[in-house]
Amino acid sequence: MNPRQRRGVLLMVVAALGAVFVFVSVIGYVGRVQADANAAVGEMTTVLQIQTDVEAFQPIAAAAVREVQIPKKWATNAFVTQLADLQNKVAAGRIPTGAYLQQGMLQDRPALRPGQREIAVMIDAETGVAGKVVNGSIVDVYSTFESVAGSRSGPCAVRILSRVQVINVGPERQVTNDRAQQQSGGGGVTSGALPVTFALTGDETLRLTYAEAFSRKLRLALVGGQQDPRPPANQLCQTPTVGK
């Protein structure tokens, strides 16, 4: 073997040793990165994740969330970890799908004060609520009454409740208005309506029950501010024309 061949063999041996060294170094680096990643992840913990959009002031059903595992070092005490934590809570704002639930996203459901009653009535979805009244809103409730034969008063619009609290606004339903059916003399009139639940005193509950049963229509008015600059009128009636 001549000197040139010996140098070639020596270079091949050095290259092979270098390749082995690089391979071992890469394997060692990957192992260290994996070990660091495992150490960083560490122990896992369970949190709740939203599976479907939840609108503001709506309760969060168990079916709307799922339990997922995340590294414990990434979680804080603000995360909601148990379904029991959702009891008597509503969304403080709109919560999108995929969000991890935290305490700041929830607020207490409006509660009844001592002596209050919780009562629900169906309100016309278009003229009664129009999407503006939500859980916790303060509203006035108005009703309209038609004139009665032989009565001295004509049709009336009456504010039956002032500044009452809405406990819950349910999903829209299709209902048949029996009163409209009787007036039209035909089939039932079907329209969209929302079940609206109020927190009322005993007297207010009685007035709302009467109006819901005998008035032509109930209407809600969203109230702003702490008080009215001037007391509004509670009733407006048409005076029948004499001789009719």
Image: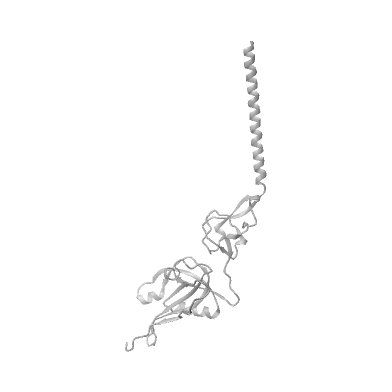
Which one is in front, 55 or 138?
138
Residue at the top extreme?
A: 2
**Quarter where residue 14 is shown:** top right
Q: Count the labels in the image.
A: 0
Q: Residue at 63%, 26% (x, y): give it.
A: 19
Question: Where in the figure is residue 43, as x and y percent of width and height?
Answer: 67, 49
Q: Position of residue 153 (x, y in %)?
A: 39, 85
Q: Is residue 4 above or below residue 206?
A: above
- In the picture, the quarter occupied by the C terminus is bottom left
Left or right, residue 111 beside residue 209? right
Q: Is residue 154 above or below residue 12?
A: below
Q: For the view shown, which residue lies furthest in the front direction?
A: 229
- Residue found 66% across the figure and 38% down from its top: 32
Q: Percent from the top left, x then y, of residue 158?
A: 44, 80
The residue positioned 63% from the left and 22% from the top of the image is: 15
> Relative to residue 137, is residue 19 depicted above or below?
above
Among the 4 quarters of the image, the one containing residue 187: bottom left
The image shows residue 80 at horizontal and vertical percentages of 62, 58
Give the image quarter of residue 4: top right
Task: Work out which residue is located at the far left of the displayed protein and give it.
Answer: 243
Instruction: Assign the N terminus to one quadrant of the image.
Output: top right
Query: Which color scheme is applied?
Result: one colour
